[in-house]
Amino acid sequence: MMVELPTDPDVLIVGGGPVGLTARALLERWGVRVLLVEKRRELSPFPRSRLVNVRSMEVFRQLGIAARIADAAFAPKYGRIRFRDTLYDRDFASAAMVGVHAPVPESPVSGVVTSQDRLEPELLAAAGAEARFGVELVGLSEDADGVVASLVDHGSGDKTVVRARYVVAADGANSTVRQLLGIGTVGPGALGSFTTVVFDADLSRWAADQPAGVYVTAHGSLIPLYPEGGWAWFGATPEDTRRADWVGLVSEALGDGTAVSAEVLRVQHWVMNAFVAERFGHGRILLAGDAAHAIPITGGLGMNTGVGDVHNLCWKLAGVLQGWAGPGLLDTYEPERRPVAHETLRQAVANAKLVAKAQKLRRDQLRNGEAPSAPIEVPWSERYFAQLGLVLGANYRSTAVHTDNGAAPESTGTDTDTDTRTGTETDTRTGTAAGPSAPPDGHTGTGTSTDYIPTTAPGHRLPHRWLAPDRSTLDTLGEWFTLLTPAPAHWQQQATPPWPLRIAPLQTEHADPYDLGAHGALLVRPDGHIAAHWRDRPRSDATVRATLTEITDAPGL
């Protein structure tokens, strides 16, 4: 039976994982009419993604759910990876997850170790927009005014035709939408087939005193699922899965000394993919998350990169739909996010090599007859894959970023390019960014994907500073552009419609660390990235209006 929806949505989201659910919550806060469809009949029962990094937690803080996510997550002491021959054995290497194991001064929040099946219900509850599970997209057609999507309800068998003005495809690495659009991918592709086995066992005797988010063994990895209990094993998929001895595989990773019987609860097979889409969409159809880039799990970067995608995209969609931005604003999505995806893929592959290097060092150690408990000097120096610069340092270069001369240089994606930026040091006593200074090693930029040095250069995330004991400068941001200035009265006349713009007073002590004179200002986009930086008050009272017109592609306003 063909069913017509009573009201067509502004945006159809395809995919009900963390990325699609985050997009639904962000768009609803903008007042955008949303319909989300997911071909699975329910939220995922598998742990899948494990790490919610600092930047994603900043986004979830903006949505008002960060505290609930943290409450259901593991304690910070679990923010560590441990290498052992088996769980029964001692560590031969270990490293802390930066931004998870302990707070970092560069953010008001910490990342957390939590299972995806704990995260998704919080994201689903964060918005009231319609979400239809068990509904699959089977066809798409696009015209000048919108997109027509054909849907099938696997429960009732009903077919539905939905007309939306835009489609956000967050439907995974095997994206139906990407395939319907004929968009190819670049990168290594499938890296191998893996299996996750969820099991129940009391392993506290071997894990409680040395907690970790992941125990990497020679026989697969072991993962605690929830603070109250539950475990998972994952490793290479056996050739004959029908005859596989899952209890035996788990027991091998536990080690002979544990004498624990594992009760297998669920088994899931999956493919580890590594690619970036050649394009992030076509016309009114846009790709996000794994549909746009499949990132290997090493380092926990994949889901978090997808959250960054929709945080970048949703305010742009809202602007076009609400009339204060032109369609050219959406053209900045791919130039800003695709370079980030490429750099993230590069980092994830590097992470995998770091793991392999630690394991090789262990094998060499055993061949040389060294004591089984002898430590190994790990190649990342106690900084879990050392990626804070990648997480917080993404640098957007597009027409949605206003430079001093009004030009928009080519996008670079992360802060690894350092030719046009200035850095700031971090005051470790106060946990806030100190004033601008020359970065180390003679560079003029903000570091590498390993290191994050805050900067107020346009294109970068606004550096965090505490305005009050529990109020960050990041908390001044929301569904609007923010003008941060120590002289709000001088900028008041600049707050002209139709753009959503709020002027946020900045205490004098924060002006110098943000490289602002007495009448300067930072214009911050709704996604927290700096759109423009005026060290002092510009000559014209129309400067902000002209800048917003430029970066939102709204010449007729």
Image (spheres, helix red, strand yellow):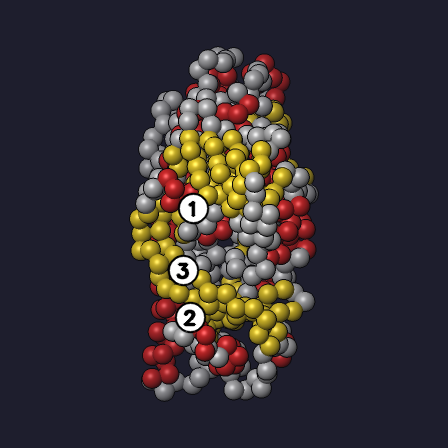
Residue at numbered disc 3: 272
Outermost residue on the front side: it is 1
Pinpoint residue 502: horizontal percent, then vertical percent. Answer: 61, 25
Q: Amino acid at mark 2?
A: Thr
Check whether the beta carbons of the residues at disc 1 and disc 3 lie within 8 A of each other. no
* Residue 374 appears in the figure: yes
From this view, report whether residue 533 is shown above or below residue 391.
above
From this view, report whether residue 501 is shown above or below residue 239.
above
Residues packed near mark 2 inside 10 Å, few (<14), some (14 to 19) or many (20 plus): some
Q: Quadrant of residue 437?
A: top left
**What residue is rendered at 57% in x and 84% in y?**
258
Residue at numbered disc 1: 176
Q: CA distance from mark 2 to mark 3?
A: 11 Å
**What residue is rendered at 61% in x and 29% in y?**
7
> Is label 1 in a helix, a strand or a loop?
helix
> Is label 3 in a helix, a strand or a loop?
strand
Q: Amino acid at mark 3?
A: Met
Residues packed near mark 3 inside 10 Å, few (<14), some (14 to 19) or many (20 plus): some
Q: CA distance from mark 1 to mark 2?
A: 25 Å
Residue at numbered disc 2: 237
